[in-house]
Image: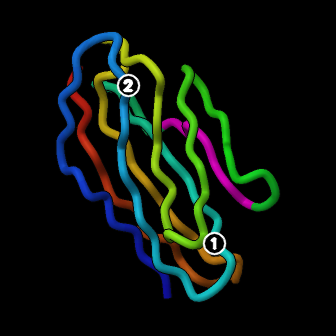
């Protein structure tokens, strides 16, 4: 079984300051981890994903996330927020066992 917990339901930041959206996961197997973004009036868009290998994953629009197995975390960061980053952000986990469904949780980022 697997789950994700996003520790901040809403994050407000000023333009130009760093962004941190926290995500912790629980997984019985080696996890696949994902961040999605949903901009206003748009569908979900994959921001970045971790499957194996390099633990620091770079995504679109300057976002990145680091897989920390010891902390069971996959926090999303950006060095400098932009007003266009205002959206809902979803952290998701899926075990590497294919028959298991994943879980998706959400954060709201206001800039």
**Residue 56 placement (x, y as % from top left):** 68, 45
Q: Label 1 neighbourhood size at 10 Å, few (<14), some (14-19), many (20+)? A: many
Relative height, residue 52 to residue 75 (above, below) = below
* Residue at x-position 51% and y-position 56%: 74
Q: Is residue 50 magenta?
A: yes
In the picture provided, is 7 more to the left or to the right than 35? left
Q: Which residues are magenta?
A: 45-51
Q: CA distance from mark 1 to mark 2?
A: 27 Å
Kindly identify which residue carries mark 1: 31
Q: Mark 1 or mark 2, which has the lower sequence index?
A: 2
**The C terminus lies in quadrant:** top left
Relative height, residue 90 to residue 67 (above, below) = above
Dot 1 falls on a residue whose secondary structure is strand
Relative height, residue 51 to residue 4 (above, below) = above
Kindly identify which residue carries mark 2: 18
**Residue 27 placement (x, y as % from top left):** 54, 81
Q: Label 2 neighbourhood size at 10 Å, few (<14), some (14-19), many (20+)? A: few
Q: Is residue 9 magenta?
A: no
**Residue 80 placement (x, y as % from top left):** 42, 17
Marks 1, 2: nearer the viewer: 2
**Residue 91 placement (x, y as % from top left):** 43, 54
């Amino acid at each position: 079984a697997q789950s994700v917990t996003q520790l901040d339901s809403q994050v407000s930041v000023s333009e130009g300051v760093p962004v941190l959206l926290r995500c912790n996961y629980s997984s019985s197997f080696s996890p696949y981890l994902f961040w999605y973004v949903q901009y206003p009036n748009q569908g979900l868009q994959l921001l970045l994903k971790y499957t194996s290998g390099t633990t620091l994953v770079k995504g679109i629009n300057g976002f990145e996330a680091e897989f920390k197995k010891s902390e069971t975390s996959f926090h999303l960061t950006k060095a400098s927020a932009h007003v266009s980053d205002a959206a809902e952000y979803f952290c998701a986990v899926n075990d590497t066992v294919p028959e298991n469904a994943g879980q998706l949780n959400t954060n709201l980022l206001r800039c």
